[in-house]
Image (cartoon, rainbow, N blue to C red):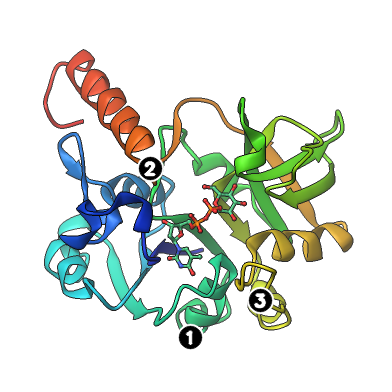
């Protein structure tokens, strides 16, 4: 299983902070934001990781993360010239993925859930993760039956069919590369991860798992502050400053 951290984008909502560096390198309590998704992958046993970055601050990522040696892992890097959509990660990452399966995590999504079992039990198709939220219309929304079979999956629907947001970590088999290549840009000009999920869903190959614990998409001032507060409290409760 290969891992991708998608850490590009323009992050205009966090200006002027993102005039200094990339959103994914801003501090969340005692670590740069990207350490959280990175640690999520490492904790789940993924050691071969591609970091996809926008051109602007690519050097900052290299300075911080290097070869991966310090993390007992191997890091590769690719530039995404324009934010062409989340599904573009599988086109940018095609050579890196090779013939393997892949887990993709968004560089601004912070979890304390342990995905080890979910990744170890993955065989084929696609797997998404969901969490109940009060504002599902801001996210991908998944509707499912009692056996956790996906019934529908929609991107930011005006009238959500459930309160379960699709969170920013996805596991796919190698077909994801071809599926990504087959997509046309949506109305917002991006190739959408929700369209990938719908391809798997139509083939009856999409599973959903519910997660617990914190999930923060730290892309706004308020969610960034909430993530900082949560991890500061947690680190102190655990009796150290290391998170
Ligand atoms: O956070 C989970 C949500 O992420 C999902 O529920 C949605 O289904 C999914 O579409 C996505 O929604 P957002 O609208 O929040 O995605 P956003 O455009 O903010 O991009 C998420 C992160 O990915 C962001 O940190 C920037 C990065 N990104 C985004 C795009 C479009 C890239 O690196 N490259 C890109 O081309």
Which disc number belongs to residue 220? 2
Asked if ligand 1 lies within 8 A of label 2, the reply is no
Q: Secondary structure at mark 2?
A: loop
In contact (CB < 8 Å): disc 2 and disc 1: no
Dot 1 lies on which element? helix
Q: Is residue 20 above or below residue 223?
A: below
Numbered tag placed on residue 73 in the rendering: none
Q: Quadrant of residue 74?
A: bottom left
* In the displayed structure image, the side of residue 115 where residue 71 appears, left or right: left
Of tags 1 and 3, the one toward the viewer is 3
Q: Quadrant of the C terminus?
A: top left
Give how far across and how far down residue 228 sits, in percent: 26, 31
Which residue sits at x=71%, y=78%?
A: 183
* Relative height, residue 173 to residue 81 (above, below): above
What is the C-alpha distance between the residues marked 2 and 1?
33 Å
> How far apart are the alpha carbons under marks 1 and 3?
14 Å
Q: Which residue is mark 3?
A: 180
Q: Earlier in the sequence, mark 3 or mark 2?
A: 3
Q: Residues within 10 Å of mark 3 (few under 14, many from 20)?
A: many
Residue 186, image x and y in percent?
69, 70
Near-viewer residue (175 or 28) = 28
Left or right: where 237 falls relative to 143: left
Q: Secondary structure at mark 3?
A: helix
Location of residue 134 by image quarter = top right
Q: Is mark 1 within 8 Å of ligand 1?
A: no
Q: Which residue is mark 1?
A: 95
Question: Which of marks 1 and 2 precedes in the sequence?
Answer: 1
Image spot of residue 97 (x, y percent):
51, 77
Side of 165 where 234 appears, left or right: left
Q: Is residue 204 left or right of residue 192?
A: right
**Closer to the camera: disc 3 or disc 2?**
2
């Amino acid at each position: 299983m290969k891992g991708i951290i998608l850490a590009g984008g323009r992050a205009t909502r966090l200006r002027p902070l993102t005039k200094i560096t990339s959103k994914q390198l801003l501090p969340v309590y005692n670590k740069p934001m990207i350490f959280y998704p990175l640690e999520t992958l490492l904790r789940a046993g993924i050691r071969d990781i591609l970091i996809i970055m926008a051109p602007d601050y690519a050097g900052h990522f290299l300075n911080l993360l290097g070869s991966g040696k310090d993390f007992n892992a191997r890091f590769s890097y690719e530039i995404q010239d324009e934010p062409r959509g989340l599904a573009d990660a599988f086109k940018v990452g095609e050579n890196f993925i090779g013939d393997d399966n892949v887990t993709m995590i968004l560089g601004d999504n912070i979890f304390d859930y342990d995905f080890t079992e979910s990744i170890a039990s993955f065989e084929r198709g696609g797997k998404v993760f969901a969490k109940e939220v009060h504002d599902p219309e801001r996210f991908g929304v998944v509707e499912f039956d009692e056996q956790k079979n996906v019934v529908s999956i929609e991107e930011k629907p005006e009238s959500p069919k459930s309160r379960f947001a699709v969170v920013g970590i996805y596991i796919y088999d190698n077909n994801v590369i071809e599926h990504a290549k087959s997509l046309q840009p949506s109305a917002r000009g991006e190739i959408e991860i929700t369209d990938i999920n719908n391809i798997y869903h139509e083939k009856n190959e999409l599973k959903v798992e519910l997660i617990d614990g914190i999930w923060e998409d730290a892309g706004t001032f308020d969610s960034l502050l909430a993530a900082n507060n949560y991890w500061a409290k947690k680190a102190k409760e655990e009796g150290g400053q290391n998170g």
